[in-house]
Image (cartoon, helix red, strand yellow):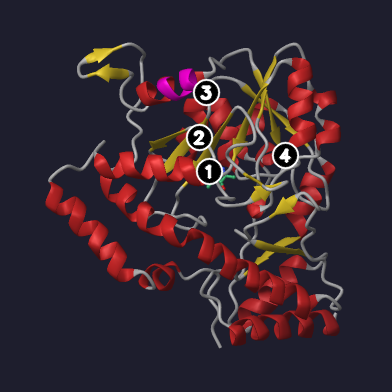
Amino acid sequence: MHVPFLDLGQINQSIRPQLDDAYRRVMDSGWYIMGPELEGFEREFAAYSDSKHCIGVGNGLEALHLLLRAYDIGPGDEVIVPGNTFIATWLAVSQCGATPVSVEPDARTHNIDPSLIEAAITPRTRAIMPVHLYGQPADMDPINEIAAKYNLIVIEDAAQAQGARYKGRRVGSLAHAAGTSFYPGKNLGALGDGGAVLTNDDTIANKIRLLRNYGSSIKYSHDFAGYNSRLDELQAAFLREKLKVLDEWNCLRREVAAKYFMLLKESHIELPFIPDYAEPVWHLFVIRSKERDALKDHLEREGILTVVHYPIPPHLQACYSDRNYSSFFVTERLAAEVLSLPMSPCLREEEIQYVVDRVKGFVEKA
Ligand SMILES: *Cc1c(COP(=O)(O)O)cnc(C)c1O
C-alpha cells in the first residue's frame, strides 16, 4: 500500500464542481484583483473567526509582517516568539528589523510555555507572537495577562489552526490581532498562495488595508511606503468555496486523529497531548520517538510518507547564525524526535490501520 502524507489533489477533487464554478465566476467577471470575491471572502472569514475585520493579503508571512509594521515595530524592538515554530514566524519579525526572542515550548503541547515568557521580557520587548502549532491553540489566557501587565501587543500566528478553539473561542479572535495563511497545505488552503489578517481594531485594519496596496487608499495617492501583498480574486473565490466545507473537513481530521489515538494508545509511541482548554483541528498529527529517523525510514520503505515539522529550529538556521542564539534544550529535543504521520480529511480507514500496524511493527522490533 502507498499512503501519501497529504494528497491535495484528492482533497480539492472532492469539491471540483464548486471550484470550477468559482473559477468561472472570476474568469467571466473580468476583474482579478481587489474585487467582490475578496470582499465576500473577507466578510465570511471574519464572521467565521469571530473577528470584526479580515484583510486578505498575499501569504501568511506577509500577514504577520504587515501586522508588525502596522504596530510600528521595527529596529531596536524585540518580539517574543516560540522557539519551536515554522521559520516564517521569526522571519516576520526580522524582516521589519526587530529581533526575534526565543521562548522554549512546553514539551507536552509543543506550544510556547507561558511560564517562561516573563523572564524573556526586556525594556525593548514590544510584542508576543504565540503560534497555534499543529492546529493546537496556544494557552492564550496567561499570555494575554503577561502582555497586559507589560503593555505588550499579542499577535496570534494562526496559520496552522483555522477553526480551532481555545476555551470555546475561535483562534484569530484571542488577542490584538492574528495572521493566518492559506498556503495549499493548510486546513483552509487556496490553490496558490494567500493569507489574511484578523483583528477587531479599526485603526490596525485600516493600516493593513493601506500597507497591502502600495500604502494607498485613493488610487495614485500614497500615505505609507507600502507593499503589494493582496489576496487575488481567484484565490478568494476558491477560499469562499473551501470555507463552506472547513468545519466538515476539520471534523474528518478529528476522526482520523481519534483513530490514531485509539489504535496507538498502547504502543509506547508518544502521542499528542490535548489540554483541557483546546479544541484542536489537527493540521498535523505529531508523534515523538527517540528513534525518529529510523522510524521514518522504516515507514518510507513500507510506502508511508511522513514529514518532520521541523528538523532545524529557527535559532539554529544559517540565516540567524550571526545572532549567536544560545541553545534551547526543549526546542532542540523536539526537533530531533517529532514525526508527522499522514493526516488529511481524505485519509481512509484502511490507510490509518496500515500506518498504525507499521508503526507498531517498528516499535515491537526495537
Ligand atoms: C505556513 C506558516 C506560515 C507562513 O505562511 P505562508 O503563507 O507560507 O507565508 C507562518 N507561520 C506558520 C506557523 C506556518 O505554518
Task: Name which residue type carries label 4.
Answer: Gly
Viewer-side residue, 41 vs 236: 41
- Mark nearest the camera among 1 and 2 is 1
Label 1 – label 3 distance at C-alpha: 14 Å
Labelled disc at residue 129: none
In the image, residue 164 sits, relative to residue 81, either above or below, namely below
Q: Which residue is mark 2?
A: 198
Earlier in the chain: of badge 1 and badge 4, it is 1
Label 1 – label 2 distance at C-alpha: 8 Å
Task: Name which residue type carries label 1.
Answer: Ser
Label 2 – label 3 distance at C-alpha: 9 Å
Q: Which residue is mark 3?
A: 201
Question: Does the rendering let one see residue 92?
Answer: yes
Label 2 – label 4 distance at C-alpha: 23 Å
Earlier in the chain: of badge 1 and badge 3, it is 1
In the image, residue 201 sits, relative to residue 165, either above or below, namely above
Task: Name which residue type carries label 3.
Answer: Asp
Picture quarter with the N terminus:
bottom right
Q: Do the CB atoms of the residues marked 1 and 2 lie less than 8 Å apart?
A: yes
Quarter-of-image position of residue 132: top right
Question: Does the rendering let one see residue 310?
Answer: no
Secondary element type, mark 1: loop
Determine the main secondary structure of the stretch shown in magenta. Answer: helix
Q: Do the CB atoms of the residues marked 3 and 4 lie less than 8 Å apart?
A: no
Q: Which residue is mark 1?
A: 49
In the image, which residues are magenta? 201-206
In the image, residue 72 sits, relative to residue 167, either above or below, namely above
Earlier in the chain: of badge 1 and badge 2, it is 1
Secondary element type, mark 3: loop
In the image, residue 91 sits, relative to residue 255, either above or below, namely above
Secondary element type, mark 4: loop
Earlier in the chain: of badge 3 and badge 4, it is 4
